[in-house]
Image (spheres, rainbow, N blue to C red):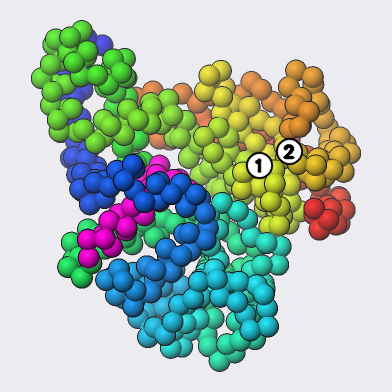
Amino acid sequence: MNDNDYVILYKEFVDNQDIQNVENKHIRFNEAFNKSQKNLNIFYILPRTIRDEASHSQFLTWLLNPEASHGLGYTFLDKFLSKSVGIEKEKFIRIDNEKKGNKSAKKIDILIELSDSLVCIENKVDSNEGKTQLNDYIKILKDDYPLKDHKFIYLTPKGEEPSNEIYHDVSYSLIFEILKEIFYSKNLNSLNAESIKHIKDYVNLIYQDIGNIKDEFNDDAYEICLKYRNLFEKLNNYGFDKKQLIKKNPGLKDTAEHMFTNYKNIVKIIKETGIKNIERKKVENVLIKLLERENLFVTYCNDSYVRFITKDMKEYFHSPSLRQGWHGGKWLFSFEFFLSMGKKRIEFQAVVPSKSKKLNDYRKKIEPIIKRIKGFDKHEDWEAPDWPHYHKIVNLNYPSIPQDKDAIEIEEEIFKLIKEVEPTVNDYEKQFKTHKQELLEMKEIF
């Protein structure tokens, strides 16, 4: 493309009102919250609080207490209860942090007592639920508050599914959205300056470090990057340095000046995230969407891989008490799509986490079952002593996402990956089904 082609493409970019709406959205967020810098943010000054569940629970207890010093009154409490468990403006009585039962040493992270209801919140930031933990809290409320209506919330960074269906799965994104809504209303007269600063610090912490909230919030900018990829690739070639871009491409001076002035938030997000990472996130999101459409259960995903099992396998391999293994390790087994950006390919394998001695023992017990599946292989070129992979396929094509490719074409290309590994997944499902009782007994041990 020559300079004139980029000017024409940029005119199309400017004429797209949706892009201006995205820029305005990020301007609004920055005006409301980004005045709080990391080196002045109390949560980063005390870094242990970033992933510490007790610290989060204490801060949330403060926010949820309408009588606390923040000045929000019932605003946060009412919005949270309405959107999480459907309670509408019930009279507040009290709130407790780490509340013990009358006959139990177990501690409930947050317990809210209302005129007619009790709301139990189990908060998990960087750990998994205990084996009987959720059931224990149900019993405590039944024993200690038999006359109240009981509601249970399982609060996690990504809204993970709890082992007990009585619990409502709630993501930290709800807290993020409610606090944004409150601050966007600009009705902050009741809040003192210190409260405003603390809440802004907390919103920035959630945005930066909890779950994938940052990616969810920035997804609209990512989509713009992919839609106008040629334009942003040009900026990327010069490290998003406006002066270097203009120096080497004087015909783009007006275009560059206008873009860096009027769309600086979108440009900043794309620069910081990286075009290749945005492409990978797109592939990952579409892959997750298609796996769920095929009635497959996503167990975990991060910047490199998407792990999943079939719905039937969940019963065999979901272990709430599992504390070691991969991050968020509640799964004794998963299939995995590994996204190799460097090699521009996707790898598929079945995996059993075995970083701990406990899980290594589990692997030794399950491996004889896996060995009976057709195509079993443990080739020395890819076998890792502490992280074994089974039925590995290394030559799956990495989906390409050029600027002129529409969403349907991308989905079709990624769907081929799922269909290509489907026979192996089906073979595992059949084999595991014949060993169901054995697997259930093994799960209880581990």
Q: Mark 2 and mark 1: span between their CA atoms? A: 8 Å
**Residue 355 position (above or below residue 123):** above
- Crowding at dot 1, Cα within 10 Å, few <14 / some 14-19 / many 20+, comes out as some
Residue beneath the point at 48% across and 63% down = 57
x, y percent for residue 31: 20, 48
Q: Amino acid at mark 2?
A: Lys
Q: Note whether residue 423 is visible.
A: no
Q: Three-letter amino acid code at disc 1?
A: Trp
In the rendered structure, the answer to whether residue 136 lies left or right of residue 119 reads right
Q: Which is the main secondary structure of the residues drawn in magenta?
A: helix
Q: Is 220 situated left or right of 115 in this image?
A: left
Q: Is residue 278 above or below residue 133?
A: above
Q: Is residue 293 toward the left or the right of residue 25 in the image?
A: right
Locate residue 296 relative to residue 55 in the image: left or right: right
- Residue that lies at the very extreme toward the front in this rendered image: 45
Q: Position of residue 14 (x, y in %)?
A: 16, 31
* Quarter-of-image position of residue 19: top left
Q: Nearer the viewer, residue 57 or 402?
A: 57
What residue would you read off at disc 2? 355
Q: Secondary structure at mark 1?
A: loop
- Residue at which label 1 appears: 326
Start and end of the magenta stretch? 192-217
Find residue 343 and report its image quarter: top right
